[in-house]
């Protein structure tokens, strides 16, 4: 009574220069989760920015439930938004005020409790919006070690769920407290940062840190670089991206802080995870998690605040765009194929010009020279068309002129290229009534049988005053371009060269040229 976690969130103090506290919510304010209006606004925000669904923590102690109202309301009111459950099977303590030693409700950790738990939550599985994998309800367990004889319990869980008419139960273990799924007890695992992330302590680099600070300060930049380059396990692992993390509102000077966070770094990490999931995970399982939607007491959230506004939510939306996915596809290809450590990180330099911090971090492994080579990657229509629209017939005046193709003049219409080499282009492009800025991506595409087979982003853009004067277009538009695209992943054969030009945000027009490329 008389206390919510907002109490500590609103009164948190900065502990050193550049320490972002307090973190004050913006659009939703200091809301009350008992309010249905709040929950509906959260779902509306999530949908608007491309969040697929919510994973609710489920607090269940031998039949006693806590904070279950939002889940119950989601289920009972049949909200049109996917959801699943993570059993937060830990002791309930006064953790919100920093006192973890005072246990209010303990987990009993008995086999009977585990069975009663699955019976209790099984009603949610029948919701058409409960997240399932091949029909099997998806359940995360926060701390597998807390379950006695987990192999037996999971087997009994699955038998019970199958008896309800489901094909199976998909059990996913959270990789917490040093655990992993190399033993294969669960169907899959998901990361749970800050568990297991790697960064050196930077306490000594904070000049004005209070002498009585007993917590830990880590470098968010270093976390991102290490997460991007770490190896993948042999089992199914869902990546989880951590937003800003700072639990000093709960723990004060004993808290943990991940310093040097920026929305751009968050977007780069998330974009990488999205593409890796698209490439590596089986169909129907291409999930990426974010920790968290609204963990304000630990300083990690997507909801708007007064400093970042909607920038973290926008990063989610950006990670699903063609521009970010094509760049990260190129980056993954470089990581997998290059023996040169420096080249493994070059492609991150072009995610956005504003990613200066990330560039500095990842290029520290080499000379730091920036490259703007693209890689032609397969165009997967079902993936990319879900995030933007392509008009196969341009609906406004547009033009692309290639003044030079692989060092040969534009008048030569047929070119023979080695797939171990590159396609180089130089020229200009024009779109009527559309601002061709430096940051709006355009793409070179390879077309066969009237379908886009491969595409690559054009990174180097420059102004062409001659083009601007001819078309009476603003002189600050970036009509000119230079392009170098690696062909290594392109199948042999004949292709028509084309371009994707912007029509409006997230909508492109396909412009076909009369150039034929024979790639062998």
Image (spheres, rainbow, N blue to C red):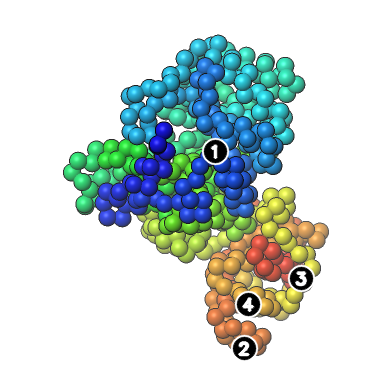
Question: What percent of the width, then of the height, locates residue 489?
Answer: 64, 52
Pair 4/3: label in front:
3
In the picture of the structure, the residue carrying the numbered disc 4 is: 428
Q: In the drawing, what numbered circle is on residue 469?
A: 2
How far apart are the alpha carbons under marks 4 and 2?
A: 13 Å
Q: CA distance from mark 2 to mark 1?
A: 60 Å
The reply to whether dot 4 and dot 1 touch (C-beta < 8 Å) is: no
- Answer whether residue 498 is visible to the viewer in this image: no
Disc on the earlier residue, 4 or 1 = 1
Q: Quadrant of residue 216?
A: top left
Q: Nearer the viewer, residue 104 or 411?
A: 104
Q: Nearer the viewer, mark 3 or mark 1?
A: 1
The CA span between labels 3 and 1 is: 50 Å
Tell me which label, 2 or 1, sits earlier in the chain: 1
Q: Is residue 317 left or right of residue 266?
A: right
The secondary structure type at the circle numbered 4 is strand
Q: For the residues carrying marks 2 and 1, which lies nearer the camera in this image?
A: 1
Assign a secondary structure to mark 2. helix
Q: Are marks 3 and 2 in contact (CB under 8 Å)?
A: no
Relative image position of residue 411 (x, y in whole percent)? 71, 79
Instruction: Look at 40% across and 36% down and name the residue there.
Output: 2
What's the CA distance linking mark 4 and mark 1? 56 Å
Measured as percent of width and height from the top left, residue 332 is found at 55, 49
Q: Residue at x 34, y 24 (%)?
A: 102
> In the rendered image, which quarter contains the N terminus?
top left
Q: Rate crowding at label 4 as few (under 14), some (14 to 19) or many (20 or more) other CA atoms within 10 Å.
A: many
The residue beneath circle 3 is 394
Tag 3 secondary structure: loop
- When the figure is inspected, residue 286 is found, relative to residue 399, above or below; the finding is above
Image quarter hosting the C terminus: bottom right
- Label 1 sits on residue: 34
């Amino acid at each position: 009574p008389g206390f919510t976690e907002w109490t500590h969130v609103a009164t948190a103090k900065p502990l050193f220069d550049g320490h972002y506290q307090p973190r004050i919510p913006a659009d939703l304010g200091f809301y009350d989760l008992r309010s249905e209006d709040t929950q509906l606004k959260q779902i509306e925000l999530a949908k608007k920015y491309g969040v697929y669904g919510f994973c609710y923590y489920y607090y269940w102690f031998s039949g006693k439930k806590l904070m279950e109202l939002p889940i119950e309301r989601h289920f009972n009111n049949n909200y049109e938004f996917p959801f699943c459950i993570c059993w937060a099977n830990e002791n309930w303590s006064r953790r919100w005020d920093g006192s973890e030693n005072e246990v209010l409700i303990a987990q009993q950790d008995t086999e009977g409790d585990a069975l009663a738990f699955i019976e209790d939550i099984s009603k949610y599985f029948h919701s058409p919006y409960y997240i399932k994998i091949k029909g099997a309800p998806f359940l995360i367990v926060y701390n597998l070690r807390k379950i006695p004889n987990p192999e037996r319990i999971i087997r009994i869980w699955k038998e019970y769920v199958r008896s309800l008419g489901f094909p199976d139960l998909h059990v996913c273990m959270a990789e917490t407290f040093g655990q992993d799924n190399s033993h294969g007890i669960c169907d899959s695992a998901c990361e749970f940062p800050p568990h297991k992330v790697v960064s050196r302590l930077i306490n000594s680099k904070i000049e004005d840190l209070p002498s009585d600070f007993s917590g830990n300060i880590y470098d968010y930049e270093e976390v991102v670089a290490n997460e991007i380059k770490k190896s993948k396990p042999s089992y199914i692992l869902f990546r989880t991206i951590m937003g800003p993390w700072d639990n000093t509102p709960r723990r004060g000077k004993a808290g943990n802080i991940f310093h040097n966070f920026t929305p751009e770094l968050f977007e780069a990490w998330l974009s990488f995870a999205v593409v890796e999931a698209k490439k590596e995970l089986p169909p129907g399982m291409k999930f990426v998690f974010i920790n968290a939607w609204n963990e304000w007491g630990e300083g990690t959230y997507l909801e708007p605040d007064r400093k970042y506004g909607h920038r973290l939510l926008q990063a989610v939306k950006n990670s699903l765009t063609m521009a970010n996915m094509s760049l990260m596809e190129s980056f993954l290809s470089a990581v997998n194929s290059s023996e040169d450590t420096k080249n493994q990180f070059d492609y991150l330099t072009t995610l956005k010009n504003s990613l200066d911090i990330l560039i500095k971090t990842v290029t520290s492994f080499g000379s730091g020279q920036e490259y703007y080579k693209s890689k032609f990657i397969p165009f997967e229509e079902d993936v990319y068309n879900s995030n933007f629209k392509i008009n196969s017939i341009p609906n406004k005046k547009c033009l692309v002129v290639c003044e030079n193709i692989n060092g040969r003049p534009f008048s030569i219409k047929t070119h023979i290229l080695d797939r171990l080499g590159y396609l180089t282009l130089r020229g200009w492009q024009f779109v009527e009534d559309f601002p061709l800025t430096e940051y709006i991506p355009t793409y070179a595409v390879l077309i066969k049988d009237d379908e886009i087979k491969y595409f690559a982003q054009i990174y180097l853009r420059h102004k062409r005053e001659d083009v601007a004067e001819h078309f009476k277009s603003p002189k600050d538009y970036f009509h000119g371009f230079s392009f170098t695209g690696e062909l290594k992943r392109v199948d042999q054969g004949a292709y028509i060269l084309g371009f994707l030009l912007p029509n409006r945000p997230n909508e492109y027009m396909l412009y076909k040229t009369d150039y034929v490329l024979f790639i062998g």
